[in-house]
Image (cartoon, helix red, strand yellow):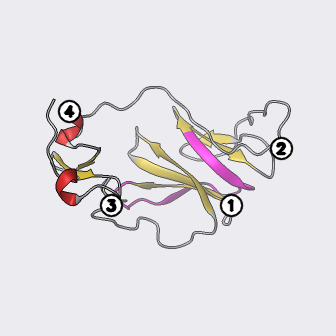
Amino acid sequence: MSNADGTDRRQLVPTELGLPNGLTVDWDRNELCWGDAGTQRIECIKKDGTGRRVVYPQAAYPFDLAVHGDTIYWSDWETKSIPNVHRDGGTLNEPLKLAPGGNGRVYGMVAITSCPRGTNACAVNNGGCKYLCLPRPNAQRTCVCPDDITEAECNTIKFR
């Protein structure tokens, strides 16, 4: 976990990982959830790094995942389906079937209900940044620029 500009980086899950693949946010619980094809598990952890838990311990080859309501869905490259389970764990629900065609490997999944509301220092006038504004905590921001731009030009405040 880190700020958008890469500062204050900290590792949330340093152990017991095999081949972690998908990563999604459960906004209702403020948790990060992932699938791991090496350990064959679906897991979640609070965004402060506490409360790591196994949601489902027998996922064959999870690749990507998404949360919608109380359900975690993942694409499984071995079963070639989209298994799903209640976010508190338990037994699997009926898996979603894939559309005909393709190789059965779903690479990306997205479940959209609504976007979380929020504001940050980049929300208005790109934070005054000429190119790219990266929000930081406490209403701060970092401006970044392409490699071929001088630092002086990059830090020039832009007004509209």
The magenta segment is: 47-66
Q: Nearer the viewer, mark 1 or mark 3?
A: 3
Q: Position of residue 121 (x, y in %)?
A: 19, 41
- Say which quarter of the image contains residue 139: top left
Q: Give the camera-side residue of 133 and 154.
A: 154
Query: For the residues marked 1 and 3, what is the alpha-carbon distance in whole angstroms?
Result: 27 Å
**Residue type, numbered disc 3:** Gly
**Is there CB contact under 8 Å for labels 2 and 4?**
no
Residue depicted at 74% across the width and 37% down the height: 95
**Is there CB contact under 8 Å for labels 3 and 2?**
no
**Residue type, numbered disc 2:** Asn
Give the number of the disc on residue 89. none
Reading the chain from its start, which is encountered first: label 2 or label 4?
2
- From the image, tell me which residue sits under label 2: 103
Q: Is residue 120 visible?
A: no
Q: Secondary structure at mark 2?
A: loop
Residue depicted at 66% across the width and 40% down the height: 84
Q: Secondary structure at mark 1?
A: loop
- From the image, tell me which residue sits under label 3: 6
> Residue placed farthest to the bottom in the image?
15
Q: Position of residue 92 (x, y in %)?
A: 70, 42
Residue depicted at 51% across the width and 73% down the height: 15
For the N terminus, which image quadrant? Answer: bottom left
**Residue type, numbered disc 4:** Asn
- Say which quarter of the image contains residue 110: top right
Query: For the residues marked 1 and 4, what is the alpha-carbon distance in whole angstroms?
Result: 42 Å
- From the image, tell me which residue sits under label 4: 125
Q: Give the camera-side residue of 145 and 30.
A: 145
Q: Give the camera-side residue of 98 and 128.
A: 128
- From the image, tell me which residue sits under label 1: 37
